Image (cartoon, grey):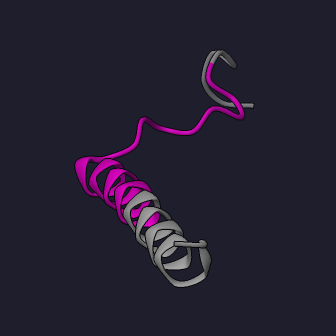
Amino acid sequence: MTGSGRDEGREPPPDRLETWAKWTGRTLGFVALFLLALHLLNTYAPR
């Protein structure tokens, strides 16, 4: 047993690359879903 035991099981705070990757992945995912919805609406919606 080393340390005070306060931070056992806690992960270190995410670094800048991890934060950027998460934000970019979510943003690109939402953009892709939005474009897919627009494509499906334009393709199959009645005119």
Q: Nearer the viewer, residue 8 or 40?
A: 40
Q: Is residue 31 left or right of residue 41?
A: left
Up the image or down, 6 lies above or below 32; here it is: above
Location of residue 45 (image quadrant): bottom right
Query: Can you give x and y, in whole percent of width and height, for residue 2 in the image?
Result: 66, 30
Looking at the picture, tell me which residue is in the foreground, 47 or 28.
47
Q: Nearer the viewer, residue 41 or 12?
A: 41
Total numbered labels placed on residues in the image: 0
Q: Quadrant of residue 34?
A: bottom left
Q: Residue at x 31, y 59 (%)?
A: 24
13 shown above or below 27 = above
- Where is 10 relative to 24, above or below? above
Q: Residue placed at 39% from the left, 43% from the top?
A: 14
Does the stretch in magenta take in 42?
Answer: no
Q: Residue furthest bottom?
A: 43
Residue with the most extreme front position: 47
In-image side of 42 versus 1 (left or right): left
Measured from the top left, where is residue 21 in percent x and y?
34, 60
Left or right of residue 43: residue 27: left
In the figure, residue 22 lies in which quadrant? bottom left
Query: Which segment did they paint magenta?
Result: 7-29
Q: Is residue 33 above or below residue 14?
A: below
Magenta stretch: dominant SS?
A: helix
- What residue is drawn where x is 62% and y is 23%? 7
Quadrant for the N terminus in the image: top right
The percent coordinates of residue 19 (x first, y second) are 33, 48
Image coords of residue 18 (percent x, y) = 36, 55
Instruction: Name the residue: 63% across, 32% down.
Output: 10
